[in-house]
Amino acid sequence: MATQTVLVINSGSSSIKYQLVDPDSGEPIAKGLIEAIGEDSGHATHTYGEERRELDRVIADHTEGMAIMEEFFSTLGPDLASSHIVAVGHRIVQGGKYFSGPALIDEEVHDKIVDLCPLGPLHNPAHLKGIDAARKIFPDLPHVAVFDTAFFQSLPEEAARYALNREVADTYEIRRYGAHGTSHQFVSGEVTRMLGRDDLKQIVLHLGNGASASAVVNGHAVDTSMGLTPLEGLVMGSRTGDIDPAAVFHLLRQTDMGVDELDDLFNKRSGMKGLTGDNDMRRVHERIAAGDRDAADGFAIYIHRLVSYVGAYTAVMGGLDALTFTAGIGENDAKVREALCERLAFLGVRIDAEANAQRSGEARVISTPDSAVTVLVVPTNEELAIARQAMSLV
């Protein structure tokens, strides 16, 4: 029987990230990125095996971006017609309270994703562009939506509901939805498999430019740091994370900034970028080494927030068996892992300095045998998770 594949698409406001995946082996067959869509100069790359091709030209819209992707597959390979694609999987950030798992995209599901745009204004409209363009190119294939929020539908009411007036909250669907759920579900599942236990109390730290934490008990999420939107929670590359909401009222009263400007300030000009001038943690480390006080303070704030969440989630779960780092910073920044674990020594956390310093793309344990908590680094693979969820429906 020929290998069945899934084409995974992650459509942003000005980009399309795609990957052709073998869900059984977990191997990416080909992948690419089309970026700066709708801007003065676009850029596209496609990688298949040892071959890589790049293209620089104006890319008017997502439909043209999808056409470039199709052209890459046709000229560089693999040929999509003979790749035995059984589904196209689409990453969707906001599924609201309506989707607890993947969904075949019919008109009803499409319309619901449209309806949820006010809850995901930075993401859902971009995902819809990708869906619409892909359905034109692949009209005969099933298209599957995989929602970042789905894993967190299991949150208990005490974690999901804010202490906001109940009528207002229910009318406008304000609650904790979380994000990065596809990654948290995949990584926590890998930890369960690696440790050979399905009764774990886990904390997963997805630390990238966007960052989130989750508390997972027996495979089910019981808390997460992102909230109504991906703005809440940890200090991120350019997002504030937790902040007193009255800061918004104060700035509205004291400045001439409007809602859109405040949205931009909180989402794009704050976090590590706002604290240190850089949202790249490598540059932050360089600044600290050079004696930059703002960088040192920013890093301390970043770690303080992590400590606070790990402590809170350990209390929520009544213990902690495994602490896992994933995503760009979590997988690659030994200094962040070391700084956090040093602060968690009171929980009996002990990491192996040599194992922590190791650069590897493999999942691994970095704690010592006598550590009361198993500390791991597990590379996330959202594309594979999306492919497998899409396959589960078709």
Image (tube, rainbow, N blue to C red):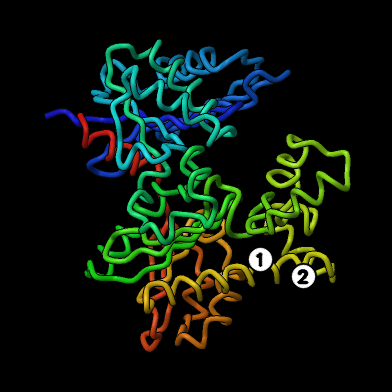
Name the outermost residue toward the left.
Answer: 1
Horizontal and vertical percent position of residue 262: 75, 42
Q: Secondary structure at mark 1?
A: helix
Q: Amino acid at mark 1?
A: Tyr
Q: Residue at x 47, y 31 (%)?
A: 116
Give the residue at mark 1.
302
What separation in Å lies between label 1 and label 2 (alpha carbons)?
10 Å
Horizontal and vertical percent position of residue 2: 16, 28
Query: Quadrant of the rendered structure where residue 42 is?
Result: top right
Query: Quadrant of the rendered structure where residue 314 is?
Result: bottom left
Q: Residues within 10 Å of mark 2 (few under 14, many from 20)?
A: some
Q: Residue at x 68, y 54 (%)?
A: 245
Tally the numbered discs.
Answer: 2
Residue 82 horizontal side relative to residue 283, left or right = left
Q: Residue at x 43, y 63 (%)?
A: 204
Q: Residue at x 39, y 30 (%)?
A: 90
Mark closer to the chain start, 1 or 2: 2
Give the residue at mark 2.
296
Query: Quadrant of the rendered structure where residue 112 is?
Result: top left
Q: Amino acid at mark 2?
A: Ala
Horizontal and vertical percent position of residue 338: 57, 75
Answer yes or no: is residue 240 visible.
yes
- Where does the N terminus fall, quadrant-wise? top left
Answer yes or no: is residue 47 visible.
no
